[in-house]
Image (cartoon, rainbow, N blue to C red):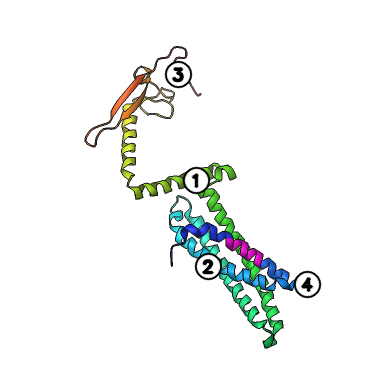
Amino acid sequence: MPNLAQYHPQIVHFVVALLFVGVALRIASLIPKLKFANHAAALLLLIGTGAAVLAVQSGTDAHGPVERIPGARALVVEHEEVAKQAKNIFLAVAALELIALGLARPSLGVDRYARVAQVASVVVGLYGSLVLYHASEHGGELVYSYAGGPGLRTGRPADVERLLLAGLYNQSREDRKAGRVADFFELAELMCIDALHRRESCGGHFRAESQTPDGEALRHDDEFSYVAAWQYADESGKPTLHKEQLEFEYVHPSTRSYK
């Protein structure tokens, strides 16, 4: 069977729509004046159940990369389990619908039993709808807490942090595929070289050996009042530091105490 991972978001929306509407029409068909909804309900429930099977398969194909996003595994596993439960329940609904269609044939003379099967389909379908709702809720949480939109949807710092982790993880996967991992190691090495070169504490750059007796950052403006850029060297050499001195005419550097 082909890998359906990329189609999972599209398939699950059809599942939810088809099955919820199908259950609603099946309930309506039990009302004498609305018997015309009978075949429509059966059709939607059968198609929706088939789509649910595809949704579970596509979710299984997609779960690997998503599960490896930091912090997402527990929610992915729970989403999968509830989704499989919903699929199995609607497979039972589909079986009841097929039984009802078979019993409804006038030549058999057992129409009343078809009605019993339809009522059973409603009961099982309502329970399945509840489980499907929970599966959808878990899926939505995965999307908005790990895959996009949390800053706009919730604003919770934890969601934004998870989104950043997910973005970094997926970017690292693409970089590995493209063979760009070496570039990041070179950048990390350069950051270490730069941090060791700057023998002072300033802003977010704090060195334990460069602090005041009160524990505040201790700058060395006479040595490090410049903007700098490192020039790339070939593989056998070291990067070259280029500096441009800063001149203060109106506002001069001063020491601030945060106590």
| Residue that carries the numbered disc 4 in the rendered image | 33
Q: Are marks 1 and 3 in contact (CB under 8 Å)?
A: no
Q: Secondary structure at mark 1?
A: helix
| Residue that carries the numbered disc 1 in the rendered image | 163
Determine the residue positioned at 62% across, 80% down.
99
| Residue that carries the numbered disc 3 in the rendered image | 255
The image shows residue 200 at horizontal and vertical percentages of 36, 24
Q: Secondary structure at mark 3?
A: loop
Main secondary structure along the magenta-highlighted residues = helix
Kindly give the residue lying farthest to the right in the view shown.
Answer: 33
Q: Secondary structure at mark 2?
A: helix
In the picture provided, is 104 more to the left or to the right than 15?
right
| Residue that carries the numbered disc 2 in the rendered image | 53
Stretch of the chain drawn in magenta = 14-22
Kindly give the residue lying farthest to the top in the view shown.
Answer: 249
Quarter residue 240 falls in? top left
